């Protein structure tokens, strides 16, 4: 009766302590040889009861499962495939853990807290951005004139009051009372500020935007903490809120709004200059460096910049350029998939993560594929750089591409695109950038990614014996049998997940 090798391998693995307990896998003519981290975790009696297992031997520090000639080759291949999946996942998890340790710096902690303020706002930004895009198409086409004013109100209401939400989240994140942070931040968008003069300049409602709201709420949190420790408990419920709103509110009007307005204007000017003057080079750098930011989790810190640009110009010109990093990652993953036709585990990972990657969610491909393999992460960055340079080049030529909301990228960004030359030209430039990123990421990874060598390091090949017979001397090598090393003809049975390193 022919033994089902995959079922046998699946039955053996938990009985030797699971994949985490398996240090290395090899086999000889009849035995599956395992090096176990903790041999005591293996259940010898249960192993002997597994169909197809002829015996269990513990000798010379190795745990040996006797399966018989022929069967051992097939079972070892399936066993190696099961453990390879664990090694790949463990390596990705290890990279994440080491990265978290490196990220434990004051600057990165501050950036993560900043991201925590804006990330909860992303669903509303996406929803309102899509509606704004649809409304823009209707207005340009002259369709449904009775509906477009309503859509304008629905799409614009959140953006008109985003300062309040930013203030609420800021106070919540930094230890203040959320509603007080929102109350002080609301001053930024209150129409009555137009009657206030600061530094000889009359303020404008919304001046400073989300940056002003963020600063106002931080000031409110600081004032509130001072009051909590100094105001008598009997008066705390009255005086603390009043003093917080008064002091932080005046500070916002007579300092923060003016300063934040200057910073916001500088951000808009710098972004426009960057792409219209040094577009191709700027796109190259931004597209090439964004994947490392995603890996570090610092890309969320750019949300205030995107939001500021959307408030000022109606769209952010940076997001489509940065989205090219995801295109490079998709191209690199496709090259790995094609290059490693015999690596079932890695190919399954790519198949499951690629749809998300096409829609701009890059973490599954980063931690499941490119980072564990090493060099493909760099070639993915090359693809992102090429796509970013493509978008930047057209910005220099007057075809700027922007996004009316933040959050999605990849194919999911198409409904949110806006630009200087109309929806058709804007979509064409963005699509050209994606295709460039895919192509360069694929080619760089296929040619220079060192994919086979990296995959072999993750899943070492398993050496098996073949029937003795005439052979070329170069095909003969010393292998281990059940008794002692002998010279015999070998045939390498590479389980899915192993391959000969490419030059």
Image (cartoon, grey):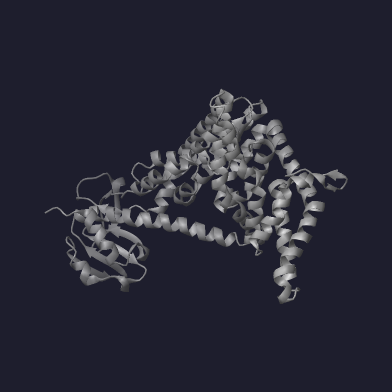
Q: Which residue extends farthest left?
A: 1
Q: Quadrant of residue 21?
A: bottom left
Q: Position of residue 463 (x, y in %)?
A: 30, 53
Horizontal arrangement in the rendering, residue 121 relative to residue 446 (left or right): right
User: Quick check: can you spot residue 503?
Assistant: no
Give above or below for 292 relative to 382.
below
Q: How far across and down, in percent of the image, does residue 321 sit?
A: 60, 37
Nearer to me, 330 or 116: 116
485 horizontally vs 156: left or right:
left
**112 or 149: nearer the eye?**
149
The percent position of residue 130, horizontal first and vertical second, equals: 54, 37
Q: Nearer the viewer, residue 318 or 232?
A: 232
Q: Position of residue 501 (x, y in %)?
A: 41, 45
**Outermost residue toward the top?**
142
Left or right: where 417 falls relative to 488: right
Query: Would you say residue 42 is visible in this rendering?
Result: yes
At a point 73% along the width and 49% down the height, the residue shown is: 188
Q: Quadrant of residue 290?
A: top right
């Amino acid at each position: 009766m022919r033994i089902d090798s995959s079922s046998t391998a699946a039955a053996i693995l938990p009985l030797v302590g699971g994949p985490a307990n398996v240090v290395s896998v090899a086999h000889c003519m009849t035995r599956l040889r395992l090096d176990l981290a903790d041999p005591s975790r293996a259940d010898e009696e249960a192993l002997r009861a597994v169909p197809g297992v002829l015996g269990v031997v513990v000798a010379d520090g190795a745990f040996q499962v006797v399966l018989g000639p022929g069967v051992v080759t097939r079972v070892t291949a399936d066993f190696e495939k099961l453990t390879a999946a664990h090694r790949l996942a463990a390596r990705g998890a290890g990279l994440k853990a080491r990265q978290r340790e490196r990220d434990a710096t004051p600057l990165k902690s501050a950036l993560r807290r900043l991201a925590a303020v804006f990330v909860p706002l992303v669903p509303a930004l996406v929803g309102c951005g899509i509606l704004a895009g649809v409304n823009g198409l209707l207005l340009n086409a002259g369709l449904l004139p009775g509906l477009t004013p309503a859509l304008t109100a629905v799409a614009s209401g959140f953006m008109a009051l985003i300062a309040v939400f930013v203030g609420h989240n800021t106070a919540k994140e930094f230890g203040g009372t959320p509603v007080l942070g929102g109350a002080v931040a609301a001053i930024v968008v209150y129409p009555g500020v137009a009657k206030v003069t600061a530094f000889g300049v009359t303020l404008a409602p919304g001046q400073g935007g989300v940056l002003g709201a963020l600063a106002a709420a931080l000031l409110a949190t600081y004032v509130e903490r001072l009051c909590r420790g100094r105001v008598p408990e009997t008066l705390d419920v009255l005086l603390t809120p009043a003093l917080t709103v008064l002091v932080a509110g005046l500070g916002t009007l007579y300092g923060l709004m003016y300063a934040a307005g200057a910073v916001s204007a500088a951000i808009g000017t710098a972004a426009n200059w960057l792409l219209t003057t040094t577009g191709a080079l700027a796109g190259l750098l931004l597209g090439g460096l964004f994947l490392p930011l995603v890996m570090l989790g610092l890309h969320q810190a750019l949300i205030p910049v995107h939001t500021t640009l959307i408030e000022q110009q109606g769209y952010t010109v940076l997001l489509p350029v940065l989205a090219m990093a995801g295109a490079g990652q998709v191209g690199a993953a496709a090259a790995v998939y094609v290059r490693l036709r015999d690596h079932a585990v890695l190919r399954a990972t790519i198949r499951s993560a690629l749809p998300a990657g096409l829609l701009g969610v890059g973490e599954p491909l980063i931690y499941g594929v490119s980072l564990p393999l090493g060099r493909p992460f760099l070639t993915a960055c090359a693809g992102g750089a090429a796509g970013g340079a493509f978008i930047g080049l057209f910005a220099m030529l007057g075809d700027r591409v922007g996004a009316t909301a933040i959050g999605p990228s990849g194919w999911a960004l198409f409904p949110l695109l806006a630009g200087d030359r109309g929806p058709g030209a804007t979509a064409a430039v963005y699509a050209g950038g994606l295709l460039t990123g895919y192509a360069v990421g694929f080619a760089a990874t296929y040619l220079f990614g060192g994919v086979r060598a990296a995959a072999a390091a993750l899943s070492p090949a398993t050496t098996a014996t073949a029937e003795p017979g005439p052979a070329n001397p170069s095909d003969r090598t010393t292998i281990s049998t059940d008794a002692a090393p002998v010279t015999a003809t070998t045939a390498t049975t590479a389980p899915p997940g192993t391959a000969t390193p490419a030059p």
